[in-house]
Amino acid sequence: MIGGGEISRRYARAVFDLGESPQARAGLLAALDALATEISGSPELSNVLLTPIHPRSERKAVLGELASRLGTSSEVRAFADLLVDHNRATLLPAIRDALRALVDAEAGRVEARVTSARPLSAEAQAELRQAISRRVKSDVTLVLDVDPTLIGGIVARVGDLLLDGSIRTQLETLGTNLRKGPAA
């Protein structure tokens, strides 16, 4: 059985393939992002569009109205209708994220998920972006999160690469080494 992540990636690949150029693919991403953002930002809209209890015709009519208001392209409208037809509209945010990864990869960008103990200043973000860019040899887009349990430092994940400079991990490593005793 195919999981939700795999299904989202397949739908994203289908949307990606609709674009004939990097600019067209970026436009499809922008339209899908606007649609997903609008839906997730409205509990009433989410309730109608993402709950199969509402008839498909009602969900499609609401989606059509929203798409018209946003000036969404016919390709993205047809794609959104397809999601409603197959009761997959709940996957829209995951599909958008998977499409963003494809568009970024085509443009030579990678996403770095950075967790810090406190919010990072704009200057620290710029320095971090440059440092990670040098390490992975790609343009980097930062996705920032705050986790006070880190105590200090940062943890950055770029694809499979994990860069852990957190105080918490350093203390855990020190504790493990102390419990092991002196090296023979």
Image (spheres, rainbow, N blue to C red):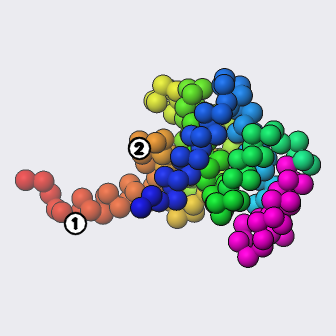
Q: Position of residue 60 (x, y in %)?
A: 80, 59
Residue 101 found in image quarter: top right
Q: Tell me: residue 163, above or below residue 26.
A: below
Q: Residue at x 31, y 58 (%)?
A: 174
Is 61 contained in the magenta span? yes
Q: Amino acid at mark 1?
A: Arg
Q: Which mark is residue 103?
A: none
Q: Residue at x 72, y 71 (%)?
A: 51
Q: Residue at x 70, y 32 (%)?
A: 26
The residue that disc 2 covers is 160
Q: Counting other residues with Cα less than 10 Å from the Cα at mark 1, is it few (<14), some (14-19), or many (20 or more)? A: few
Q: Position of residue 182 (x, y in %)?
A: 15, 57
Q: Secondary structure at mark 2?
A: loop
Boundaries of the magenta span: 42-67
Q: Amino acid at mark 2?
A: Asp
The residue that disc 1 covers is 179
Q: Residue at x 57, y 36 (%)?
A: 102
